[in-house]
Amino acid sequence: MYPIPSVLTSKTFGYASFRDAAAKRGFVLGGNWDYDQGSLDCPLDRSNQVWLRMPFEVVSGTLDSESEDTDAQIRLGEPYVLRHLYHEGLDDEAQPATIGGLVNQFAAPVDADAEVSGHWIEVARRKLGELESMVRDGLREG
């Protein structure tokens, strides 16, 4: 994980408007969201191993990924780039299970916090610049 300083850190926005603007730049709600926190994530490579993550906390209202319209206000944290290394091929440790196969479809990363090269840090900075330009172009703080 490599933190990237940003003018967006600690800014507050309406979740729906920020999410919609960020989605136009390739960001999606990360799978680790909860009702009081989450992140908007953008893959930086084709194999989905390098990501730019924009964490946030809900400061008021309700976050609900099922609803297009939400009253949630979010405060952005410091963005960072991270890299997950995955095991290629079949999982030698996998155990067959009827129900487990429906739930545990994906192998855990071999290294969930692998080193990030300078190339990916620069790619992440450029992508972050796109988010920062949303504010300069008129996305208002909440």
Image (cartoon, helix red, strand yellow):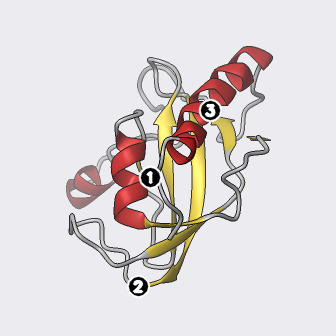
- Separation of marks 1 and 3 at Cα, in angstroms: 20 Å
Rendered location of residue 67, percent (x, y): 21, 69
Pick the residue in front: 92 or 103.
103
Q: Is residue 98 above or below residue 118?
A: below
Q: How many marks?
A: 3
Rendered location of residue 110, percent (x, y): 62, 35
Pick the residue in front: 124 or 69.
69
Pick the residue in front: 137 or 109.
137
Q: Residue 33: name its quadrant.
A: bottom left
Would residue 111 be visible to someone looking at this image?
no
Residue type marked 2:
Gly
Measuring 52% from the left and 70% from the top, which residue is drawn there? 74
What SS does tag 3 mark? helix
Which residue is tagged 3?
129
Residue type marked 3:
Gly
Mark 1 and mark 2 lie on one chain; the one further toward the N terminus is: 1
Measuring 58% from the left and 50% from the top, which residue is drawn there? 54
Q: Are marks 3 and 2 in contact (CB under 8 Å)?
A: no
Residue 61 is labelled as 2
Q: Is residue 125 above or below residue 97?
A: above
Q: Which class describes the residues within 10 Å of circle 2: few (<14), some (14-19), or many (20+)? A: some
Would residue 141 be visible to someone looking at this image?
yes
Residue type marked 1:
Gly
Which residue is tagged 1?
30
Measuring 61% from the left and 35% from the top, which residue is drawn there? 128
Rendered location of residue 137, percent (x, y): 49, 41
- Separation of marks 1 and 2 at Cα, in angstroms: 19 Å
Is residue 96 found left or right of 7 in the rendered image?
A: left
Mark 1 and mark 3 lie on one chain; the one further toward the N terminus is: 1
What SS does tag 2 mark? loop
- Separation of marks 3 and 2 at Cα, in angstroms: 28 Å
Mark 3 and mark 2 lie on one chain; the one further toward the N terminus is: 2
